[in-house]
Amino acid sequence: MFADLHLHTIFSDGTDTPLELCNLAKSCDIEVISITDHDTINGYNALKNEQIPAGIKIIPGIEISTEVNRKMLHILGYYIDIFDERLDQFINDISTEKTEATKLNFENACAKNVISYSWERVLELNPGQRRISGPQIVKAMKIDRYEVPGMSSWDMFHKYFWPENENYISHQTFTAYDAIDIIKKVGGIPVIAHPKSIKNDNIVLDLIRYGAQGIEVYHPIHTPEDTLKYLQMAENEKIYITGGTDWHGENNRKEVRHFGMCGLKSNDYPILKV
């Protein structure tokens, strides 16, 4: 694989450091990567004083997490200006709202006697995190070796912190349109992440017509038929084609078989020549 444009680090819900991702890319002969942590660019700040392996190009990126009709709707942003104060303000606002939503659902799980754990302990074990979501709760519980009665911590996560589940209390107001707007304002290219997960191609097309400039065609959850469909959509709409493994390290979804599994196989893609 030539480029993997969807990677997560310890600064959101991955388990690798930014430098470890760079080293993984080097060992897998991947020349271009993008760290696309959820609602944060702290991974790029962490690389300032690190020795990045020679030959590795890093495209500044982010994945902004929103919801629509109780489905996750994520917008990737590439070539963003990570020093733009407007981006920092947006990240602060969406992170605050996400943390409030997580706390609301955490308290709901506690009230239903699903868990008996401390919110303050979650914050203590996630220092420096402006955005607290379900994976940070799972992380804290694993550190404390706290076992959720009757289920795994990840089952608890999907049951009480995943929008599609009936137990989840929706609280977010930021939309994918807001994500597209801020990415453009800070000089970036907004791309619809893993469109299959939206489960409604009319919404995908509406986002493209609103201003999304690309679509993640290559992704582990996409079947060959999905890939062909979204490839055709990108070509019809004359937008960028992107792809990535959506790597989370030890937190990888079951579809992810190895680093660099998905992405762009050559440097011929326009997204790599911006």
Image (spheres, grey):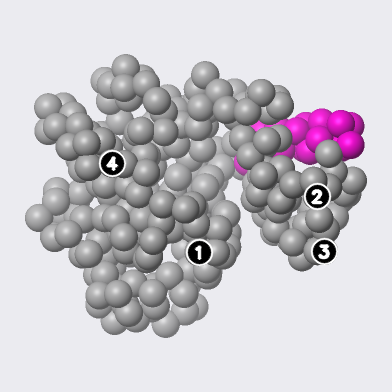
Q: Amino acid at mark 3?
A: Asp
Front position among marks 3 and 2: 2
Q: Amino acid at mark 2?
A: Val
Distance of mark 4 from mark 2, alpha carbons?
A: 34 Å
Extent of the magenta region: 95-113
Mark 1 or mark 3: which comes first in sequence?
Answer: 3
Mark 1 or mark 2: which comes first in sequence?
Answer: 2
Looking at the image, can residue 174 be seen?
A: no
Looking at the image, can residue 139 be seen?
A: yes
Identify the residue at horizontal 51%, vertical 37% (top origin): 65
Q: Which residue is mark 2?
A: 148
Secondary structure at numbered mark 2? loop
Distance of mark 1 from mark 2, alpha carbons?
A: 23 Å
Q: Which residue is mark 4?
A: 223
Q: Amino acid at mark 4?
A: Thr
223 over 83 or under it: above or below: above
Mark 4 or mark 1: which comes first in sequence?
Answer: 4
Q: Nearer the viewer, residue 191 or 158?
A: 158
Q: Is residue 100 magenta?
A: yes
180 over 254 or under it: above or below: above
Q: Do labels 4 and 1 touch, CB within 8 Å?
A: no
Q: Which residue is mark 3?
A: 144
Identify the residue at horizontal 48%, vertical 40% (top origin): 64
Distance of mark 4 from mark 3, alpha carbons?
A: 38 Å
Secondary structure at numbered mark 3? loop
Q: Where is residue 153 shown, x and y percent of the image? A: 71, 51
Q: Residue 138 vs residue 225: left or right?
A: right
